[in-house]
Image (cartoon, helix red, strand yellow):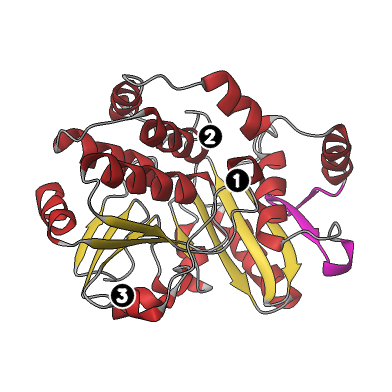
Amino acid sequence: MFKEALKLIKKYNRIIIHRHSHPDGDAVGSQMGLAQLIKDNFPQKEVYMVGDEATRLPFLNVKFDEIPDEYYNGALAVILDCGSSRLICDERYKTAETTLRFDHHIYCEAIADLDIVDSSYESACGLVTMFAKKNKLKLTPASATPLYMGMITDSGRFAFDSVSSRTFELAAFLFTQPIDVNTLYYNLYSEDFSKIIEKADNMHKIKFTPNNVAYIYTAREDLPQNSEAPTVSSGLVGLMRDIKDVFIWANFTECEDGVHVELRSNRYNINPVAVKYGGGGHKKASGCTVPDRATAMQLLNELNDLSTTEPV
């Protein structure tokens, strides 16, 4: 499959790279990394990155391309880190001559003409890195750094059980280039003191179901000013990860479309619950958006019941 993907990249002179909306480190990292890989190895090609602003990663200062519709004529559209077509950042990928996808989420649907989907990878960046390694593509610091960023963010700094020996082999491959890890980790994880206080305040909002599922629910009027629900939700869900005897945790944040939901577990497959409510993701890290608080609490009850079953 990697050879077929390379053939497509070699074939097309114009390549437009997509990923999911409200991008995280893996989505942006795979997009930036693949774009740079193509530019470094095939400098004659036109490469564009499209999508909404990366508000979770302001330090990147990445500017996504605004391109006219006709650019898709005779072009290759590449979709990264996206398991569901409804989450792709720009629907114009459908008008490209050919489509290619690299994804590490649980397979839900066919999206591209060539779908490379493998949920055994800790990140889409890991999958793109393997594509580069197998095809013996030239790496540079500009391609290796964002790919490494996506690997560390989607693996929880190599702490999640999606990590394998292959993860470290691929990280070592990226480290054949000089990656400034001190600057990268500082930019990713340092916070203003006010944000740390805000997190401490949110710790007091944690509640528990009868079967010890931890959750935080944030009403829309309580959202910090100028914040986006997905960004808030992904930040808050991590607060519950290390609570003793909690094996499923969830964050609910009200938004314009309803309630944004982030689901996590260290023992259970919570993905079917997310899929049931129109979402998806991974076995132990998934998400969805439900229409209202009542539906969110119904979902929470299902998580409560799930916690009484046998772990996976």
The answer to which of marks 1 and 3 sits earlier in the sequence is 1
Q: Does the magenta stretch include residue 211?
A: yes
- Specify the amino acid type for callout 3: Tyr
Residue annotated with mark 3: 72
Q: Which residue occupies the foreground of this view, 71 or 178?
A: 71
Q: How far apart are marks 3 and 2 (CA)?
A: 36 Å
The spot of residue 54 in percent (x, y) is 59, 54
- Specify the amino acid type for callout 1: Asn
The spot of residue 73 in percent (x, y) is 26, 78
Q: Nearer the viewer, mark 3 or mark 2?
A: 3
The answer to which of marks 2 and 1 sits earlier in the sequence is 1
Q: Is residue 28 left or right of residue 106?
A: right
Q: Does the magenta stretch include residue 259?
A: no
Q: Which residue occupies the foreground of this view, 32 or 114?
A: 32
The spot of residue 219 in percent (x, y) is 83, 66
The spot of residue 275 in percent (x, y) is 46, 68
- Specify the amino acid type for callout 2: Gly
Identify the element where label 2 is drawn: loop
The residue located at (35%, 26%) in the rendering is: 171
Residue annotated with mark 2: 156
Q: Distance between the residues labelled 2 and 1?
A: 23 Å
Q: Give the range drawn in magenta.
A: 205-222
Q: How far apart are marks 1 and 3 (CA)?
A: 25 Å
Identify the element where label 3 is drawn: helix
Q: Which residue occupies the foreground of this view, 190 or 236?
A: 190
